[in-house]
Image (cartoon, rainbow, N blue to C red):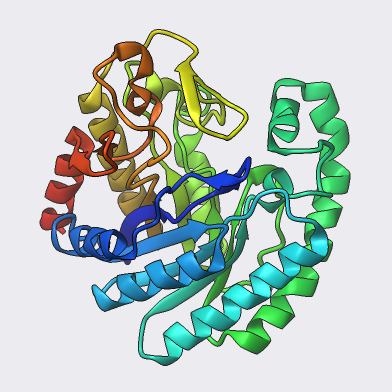
Amino acid sequence: MRVWGVTYDTGFVSAGSTTHEPFDPEAVRRDMRVIRDELRCDAVRVTGGVQDRLETAARFAAEAGLEVWYCPFTNNLPYDELMAFILDGAERAERLRGSGAAVVYLTGSEITMCNAGFLPGADLLERMALLGDPARLRAAVPPARAAIARFLAEALPAVRARFAGPVGYASLPFEAVDWAPFDIIASDAGYRDATNAAAFPQTLRAMVSQGKPYAATEFGCATHRGAADAAGTAAEPVRYDEHGRAAALTAPLERDEEAQARYVVDLLRDYEAGGADAAFVYTFASRHLPTSDDPSLDFDLASRGIVKVLPDGSWTPKAAFHALAEYGRSR
């Protein structure tokens, strides 16, 4: 495996807020140093829906010596706004690349699920509900595939006109992306759980045998007992309020940091042995899911973060952080 790293969320926009509040540039700079110096990562996938934040975090990552995977991750944007965001990101990524940084540009992430006009649904929650309704999902997939194909066919030449480095797209399996014009095959469905464990080796072989570098751009699991068995599910055991803030856990959960640690390291080793070019643990911090002394409000139990976010916004390492640091040292 050429590079490994973690995802760094700069803020997924939802309900008038983001999943990274407050956004403190100096704290981001320190985090990037930790990712490089303590975890010994080679790369970081920087995601989010606020362009200035993406660029800031990407610059700090490059300063720390990390390869930057610059990845817009937008929510509910209509076609024209989404295209403008992707092309703006390409220009910013090229400026960073032009300064001497190693940069890969991903032309968005999970576009059909997260943005307007590809799948039925007024918002992300309505579109995610399709996953629990197989009949509706089957009917919705063919037009969604056609729509994402049209979008990427328009976006990719325009991205290449602005960005001279390698280009990929953080995909979902049902999108059935045509990888021929891309430099990198990338999947946000890098999870292994009880639903796909038996077929996982065969799936990985299929992904890495297509003649282009393959990147598992997202995989990880939450910090509660049993989370690894359901790692690939998009559902969280969390109820959010109208402002997008975590309000309550929807089920009693038991902390199991050791299981999370085993999961991420085992999967990294599988990707390394299986010939992946890159793999990114999801995620460094889930700042929208802080811990609490009250077990019913300990949202970190539902977090895939490898650090535990404290009520004051600072963080402390979890067992997965220490296990990944050992993995990094072993490389």
Residue occupying the point 56% across, 45% down: 17
Q: In this view, does 87 lie to the left or right of 63?
A: right
Q: Which residue lies furthest to the top in this view?
A: 252
Residue occupying the point 33% across, 28% down: 300
Q: In which quarter of the image is the C terminus?
A: bottom left
Residue occupying the point 49% across, 52% down: 11
Picture quarter containing residue 318?
Answer: top left
Q: Is residue 327 above or below residue 181?
A: above
Residue 269 is situated, as x and y percent measured from the top left of the image, at 28, 46
Identify which residue, 256 or 210, lies in the foreground: 256
Picture quarter containing residue 162?
Answer: bottom right
Q: In this view, does 196 lie to the left or right of 315?
A: right
Q: Quadrant of the N terminus?
A: bottom left
Identify which residue, 242 or 76, lies in the foreground: 242
Q: Is residue 47 left or right of residue 139?
A: left
- Could you tell me if residue 198 is visible in this image? yes
Identify which residue, 255 or 139, lies in the foreground: 255
Identify which residue, 192 or 203, lies in the foreground: 192
Q: Is residue 298 above or below residue 191?
A: above
Residue 159 is situated, as x and y percent measured from the top left of the image, at 66, 79
Residue 168 is situated, as x and y percent measured from the top left of the image, at 57, 67
Q: How many marks?
A: 0
Residue 108 is situated, as x and y percent measured from the top left of the image, at 62, 61
